[in-house]
Image (cartoon, rainbow, N blue to C red):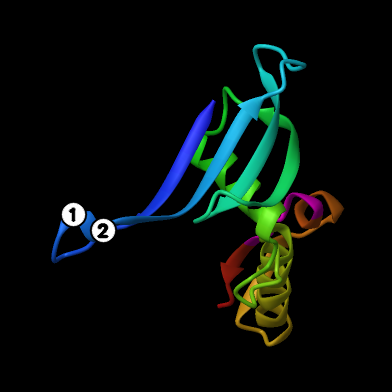
Amino acid sequence: MIVVTVELKSAISHTRDRVLGVLTIANDGTGDARVGHYVAELKDARGRVLDTCRIRAFPRMRLLAWDLIYRALRATRGDRNGDDVTGRQRAMLAVAREMREVAAGRYVAMSLDARDVVGLRPRLRPAR
């Protein structure tokens, strides 16, 4: 089980410290050595449950605990900061920017086929 406690530490006195919230992530026991399935619970300062979620097929051997915490927070709180663009969408936007560069004549596409767009790795070289 992973427990993330967010605390406000007082610079004046430790008696003024207080817990702002707690995120608990527990393995649900249905995964295997490579892939884990988890249940997360987010609580406020008073211990009230704000939200719960399930994280399925987490690649535990490839990613870190921070990635699991991120997924739990993203699933329970969603887009709270106005950044509704996902990582994949951000990568697709980067591909679109590079393609505009090609269209503007600044770069020449050495290889840009369907696999490159799906894999988000167009290969470009500067125009001469």
Mark earlier in primary sequence (2, 1): 2
- Residues in magenta, as a range: 118-123
Taking 64 as reference, is 118 above or below it?
below
Of discs 2 and 1, which sits in the foreground?
1
Residue tagged 1? 14
Classify residue 74 by image quadrant. bottom right
Question: Which one is in front, 12 or 105?
Answer: 12
Direction from residue 124 to residue 114 in the image, left or right = right
Label 2, label 1: how many angstroms apart (C-alpha)?
A: 7 Å
| Image coords of residue 25 (percent x, y) | 60, 34
Give the residue furthest to the right: 114
Name the kind of residue labelled 2 in the image: Lys
Report x, y in % for residue 23: 55, 44
Q: Residue at x 86, y 54 (%)?
A: 114
Q: Quadrant of residue 41?
A: top right
Q: 42 above or below 89?
A: above
Q: Looking at this rendering, what residue extends furthest in the left direction? A: 12
- Indicate which disc residue 9 carries: 2
Look at label 1 and name its amino acid.
His
For the residue pair 14 and 78, the one nearer the viewer reads as 14
Quadrant holding the N terminus: top right
Residue at 66%, 60% (x, y): give it.
Answer: 77
Q: Position of residue 98 (x, y in %)?
A: 66, 73
Q: For residue 121, say whether it is visible.
A: no
In the shown orientation, is residue 19 left or right of residue 28?
left
Residue 99 position within the rendered picture, expressed as x and y whole percent measured from the top left:
72, 75
- The answer to whether one can see residue 24 in this image is yes
Q: Total of numbered circles in the picture?
A: 2
Question: Looking at the figure, which quarter contains the C terminus?
Answer: bottom right
**Few, some or many residues within 10 Å of mark 1 (<14, 14–19, 20+):** few
Instruction: Please identify the residue farthest to the top as the structure is shown.
Output: 33
Q: Nearer the viewer, residue 4 or 118?
A: 4
